[in-house]
Image: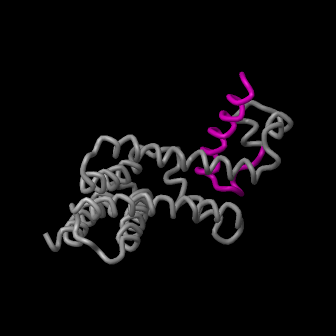
Amino acid sequence: MEERDTKQMILEKSAELFNMNGYDGCSLSDIMKATGLQKGGIYNYFKNKEEIAIQAFDYSLHLVIQRFRVRLDKDTSAWDKLNSVIETMKEFYIQPVIVGGCPIFNTVMDSANTYPSLLDKAKEGLEMLIRYVELKIQQGINSGEFYKVENTYSLASHLVVTMEGALVMSRVFKNRIYVEQAGDTLISWLDEKLFQAK
């Protein structure tokens, strides 16, 4: 196995372990077992467990953004893109990009009080997701498709927070009704906010 392939394999396996078990719940021994590598083989590529966790999160975040892009690249209107964002987030419940659920939310909760470097990465991921949605709203405004709203960030963050919360509820109660209801409510709400002057 080539050096780059080995590092990628470590990241993929570690990303799943961290996402399922959290930072404290994932030991170096767990990573060694999952990868089939010894400690020295892993530390050839990473300085320590924290560096593995940070790079594993970056890998997970890339998968999240890639999932959105694959779907949204097929859409032509800004409204279709917003609908696709919501539909994609709904699908995260049935088909998460990585085992264990949303890596952004999981990392935020896992690192909130104990691991500042990981929390910073998770915050960046959350902000990136919100900005991604905000950009789609702004594109609709610029094209004249949407009414000019005062605070695009507020709309985008409300969408992301609502769907993230619904994903948690669906996971806790093992029922996708929460993501379905949240998505339907958001579509109606966005329709009112973005087309109110049309």
Q: Is residue 11 left or right of residue 51?
A: left
Residue furthest to the left in view is 198
Q: Is residue 76 left or right of residue 162?
A: left
Instruction: Out of 91 and 72, give the one closest to the viewer.
Output: 72
Q: Is residue 164 magenta?
A: no
84 lies above or below 193: above
User: Which residue does the image show at 30% across and 50% down from the upper left?
Assistant: 84
31 lies above or below 80: above
Residue 46, image x, y percentages: 79, 43
The picture quadrant where one finds residue 149 is bottom left
Which quarter of the image is occupied by the N terminus? top right
Instruction: Out of 15 and 174, give the one closest to the viewer.
Output: 15
Residue furthest to the top in view is 1
- The coloring applied to the image is one colour
Q: Is residue 81 left or right of residue 42?
A: left
Residue furthest to the bottom in view is 150
161 lies above or below 83: below
Q: Main secondary structure of the magenta part?
A: helix
User: Which residue does the image show at 57% across and 62% down from the upper left?
Assistant: 124
User: Which residue does the image show at 72% across and 41% down from the upper left?
Assistant: 31
The picture quadrant where one finds residue 67 is top left
Residue 81, image x, y percentages: 30, 52
Q: Which residues are magenta?
A: 1-28
- Count of picture labels: 0
User: Which residue does the image show at 72% across and 47% down from the upper left?
Assistant: 52
2 lies above or below 117: above
Residue 15, image x, y percentages: 62, 45
Residue 116, image x, y percentages: 70, 67
Q: Is residue 136 left or right of residue 128?
A: left
